[in-house]
Image (spheres, coloured by chain):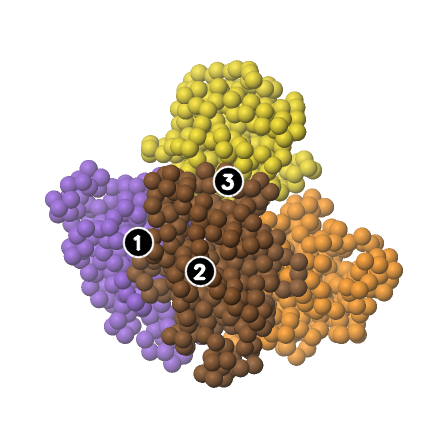
Chain colours: A yellow, B brown, C orange, D purple
Amino acid sequence: MCRWLAYTGSPVLMSDLIIKPKDNLIHQSLHAKSPRTPTNGDGFGVGWYDKQPMPGLYRTIRPAWNDLNLLDITSHIESPLFMAHVRATSLATIQETNCHPFRYKRWLFVHNGQIAEFGSMKQELMGKIAPQYFQNILGSTDSEIMFHLALSFGLEKDVPAAIGEMVRTVESTAKKHGVDAAIWMTLGISDGESLWGFRYGSDGKRPTLYASPDMSELKKLNPDIKDKIADHSHCLVSEPIGNYQDRWKPIPDNSWIQIHQKQVNEGHFQL
Amino acid sequence: MCRWLAYTGSPVLMSDLIIKPKDNLIHQSLHAKSPRTPTNGDGFGVGWYDKQPMPGLYRTIRPAWNDLNLLDITSHIESPLFMAHVRATSLATIQETNCHPFRYKRWLFVHNGQIAEFGSMKQELMGKIAPQYFQNILGSTDSEIMFHLALSFGLEKDVPAAIGEMVRTVESTAKKHGVDAAIWMTLGISDGESLWGFRYGSDGKRPTLYASPDMSELKKLNPDIKDKIADHSHCLVSEPIGNYQDRWKPIPDNSWIQIHQKQVNEGHFQL
Amino acid sequence: MCRWLAYTGSPVLMSDLIIKPKDNLIHQSLHAKSPRTPTNGDGFGVGWYDKQPMPGLYRTIRPAWNDLNLLDITSHIESPLFMAHVRATSLATIQETNCHPFRYKRWLFVHNGQIAEFGSMKQELMGKIAPQYFQNILGSTDSEIMFHLALSFGLEKDVPAAIGEMVRTVESTAKKHGVDAAIWMTLGISDGESLWGFRYGSDGKRPTLYASPDMSELKKLNPDIKDKIADHSHCLVSEPIGNYQDRWKPIPDNSWIQIHQKQVNEGHFQL
Amino acid sequence: MCRWLAYTGSPVLMSDLIIKPKDNLIHQSLHAKSPRTPTNGDGFGVGWYDKQPMPGLYRTIRPAWNDLNLLDITSHIESPLFMAHVRATSLATIQETNCHPFRYKRWLFVHNGQIAEFGSMKQELMGKIAPQYFQNILGSTDSEIMFHLALSFGLEKDVPAAIGEMVRTVESTAKKHGVDAAIWMTLGISDGESLWGFRYGSDGKRPTLYASPDMSELKKLNPDIKDKIADHSHCLVSEPIGNYQDRWKPIPDNSWIQIHQKQVNEGHFQL
């Protein structure tokens, strides 16, 4: 199981969310509460938007907790929109090209979950990727294939529609291979303007995904962040962070959320 | 351009061939004579056979010249049959899964050269790999695809025939994409019993490949190796090593060589 | 807290002890039972003796559980005497030169534990190292300083005496700096002939150290290993491994053990 | 021989100086013109100042030319004052803690050159470092010792005086060890306000160091940079970069330069 965090709002130092809060992503990666996945030491990545044409990317196979560069980079880069991800896997090889976020032009993509029996259907799924996106594939994970299928199905035009089509394609391919519960996912996606979160599982089981409490409410509880974070800021996380974890709101099953500037849209994930 | 070396014969410490000789592979990697590829700092790998069921593999993205583990491993492992490879590339990502040798069961494979405009035909070539071999692909290089195409075409039964079929497949696919000079290669291949070397280029140009001088002759020149290396031993290299480099024999254009115990077979590479 | 294992006896594949047994070192590194140190992802090393003049060394900062090279190397190298070590630390930097074993000529050294407030007395301790050993120091750990102090105090001639002198030196230096409980350690040491284990703590607390059950007894319980491991073989570990963990024998407090061929010597650790 | 670049002036993207110019540092690292040092593949580092209390640091043992993170980081971080360094060495181990810049609080330090026979006098030099700086030493290079000696001799108060004292100390220590030509160096130093460059060699031989041409002059030659770089900006480099390399001004032998805001001070390096 992987873990991820995505933020959009007023510019903040990335370390303020990735490293400083109680039970932050790095801490979670080392001290997992669940016995099933004892540690997330199989790679870390962060992608951020700024005024440059492409989002920046820092990915490393070092465990996040012992990477000095990670500490410095996140403590020096401010961003109004970024994603961070820690991997734990016994499947695809540990290499930087398998670390999230994945990037295509202005787009970033993080995933927690998996495609069941991915190895047996990988070749068939790769055949369905549109040629203009194929060369952007650098690694060997199911996550990267999911991203490029979604791109092939129009992610750049309609995010929920493309993700729906990607899920249907994986599920129908899986069915042919005799796999029933094909996909299990939360996704974080951005084009630098909007931030989308998805939560879905073919068999009803799915990883957790939470949205941050209302910032105005959080500021009353914790005046320290008053001048740091604007009221319209939002954070999505695989597991709550910080001092008020019971205030984080679970994203409902089979649904998505889009945060665009000060507006939040939600939708049911229709297949 | 990459460099490689393969050895078969009486068991020797791998460092005796990879590290100790004048102008050895590691030295070549740092001090390339040709201005075209100034350095081979993009990964190293060595694969060796011993009494274990699978050949061993050590692959690293560290430049070979600054990897202390490489020095220790090759100075402690004796093998009667091994291959070493140093990469220089501006193409596929620098990661261990892109380092040679590639391995499938008992088979090892190293490559110098390239498929022209590989990116544009990669998806099509991947579609031609037999499903039972597909899951063995871990990286993103043209070399690994060549190996798995050859496996799909019967490498385990008839090496020259499978390599011929692989080359024809790449060339015909390239033609459809408007690429004339499709492939440029030397290959080293082994199943732990035989060692094969191939040299071929679609347009007549191809990388160099040399076979070692006759060992009995070499021992007269250099009595130091008299007790180390048996007369029936052979070495294949992309560029000659050691003190008697003018004695190394170029492998002819479009041809192959098979060394099997004390026997050497040669053939023209027919397409 | 680190973990280590040392073996001496009939030659075995290193993976047979490091990777295959139940609750082996790699497994322990990922699934620590104690809540205090949740994971040992800060580096791995193995040193082995064979017929070469120096012991071999493979050290890596990759977590042991995701290092493919480690798997291959230990599955291909047989040795009659070797040591493996996994690190967990929030102190000295994660780099290969801080991974155990440390090596000087024929000697290997592994350590679990620490010198309290080492940073404040490091400079003074380094000043006490004999100049002929100083250049062999490559990293920044307390463990490496302990090894080189012991070398300076005659380790090559009398192991227990040199370790005693090293401990006394650390304790008296610590006292000057106002530190009472100065040292906390188990040590594994070898010159390629004998294997020594030490267990000591200035304040009475010390890490665990266990010796393997009698091999003849173990073979009755587990006939699978009958032909693999000779009766005179011994293993020292920070925590028991395998199926009969309750048979492992704790090394007593403040004592040492020397295994030399078929002979076992034990001593009280006198200061 | 190493290479380095330091910049102070109007904020620029670090890649505009490190990666984009003709014959830039990364290009130099791969295509060295001098036969003596064929490549600089032994580590890279960049340190930069921004509004955070400490300068940022990114150091890696990957060859600079194949590090995707380096490309992204330098293409996304703007800084008014930064230093970059590429290593080539056969001496101290390749590890991140041996990569420049070295950092102490607000201070950054890069070095090209060496202390002759450093190994034999390292212990003595380390004994001369003031205890409050000793714990900041993480690696094993002569460069880091030079920095910490200078700190011990008052670098934070008077840079040229402290560097002079450091050089004298190294030279007198060397003399005791029978070494005449003790030190060979160019240095780049900053506290986030000023940038200093030093050039010195005990035997009259010393590495090259150049200051950029006057920016107003450069803008006439290359109007592209007109809006990017302010007139008061300065760059120091071990070897000239860009299109007008003959305009770069060699720093005289045994001298230093200080750039402080719009002011440039120069001095003779008195010992």
Res. C226 image quadrant: bottom right
Amino acid carrying mark 2 in the image: His
Q: Secondary structure at mark 3?
A: loop
Left or right: A18, with B182 as reference point: right
Q: Observer-nearest residue: C24 or C222?
A: C222
Residue C240 position, x and y percent, is 76, 55
Same chain for labels 1 and 2? Say yes or no: no
- Front label number (3 vs 1): 3
Figure quadrant of residue A181: top right
State if disc 2 and disc 3 touch (CB < 8 Å). Answer: no
Q: Circle 1 is placed at which residue position?
A: D27
Q: Nearer the viewer, residue A87 or A33?
A: A87
Q: Is residue B181 above or below residue D271?
A: above
Q: Amino acid at mark 3?
A: Lys
Q: Which image quadrant for residue B249?
A: bottom left
CA separation in Å, label 3 and label 2: 26 Å
* Residue plotted at (15% across, 47% down): D218
**Residue D55 seen:** no
Residue drawn at x 69%, y 75% as measured from the top left: C193
- Tell whether label 1 touches label 3 (CB within 8 Å): no
Q: Is residue B211 left or right of residue B152?
A: left
Quadrant containing the C terminus of chain C in the rendered view: bottom right
> Local crowd at mark 3 within 10 Å, few (<14), some, or many (≥20)?
some
Q: Which residue is mark 2?
A: B268
Q: Which residue is mark 3?
A: B128
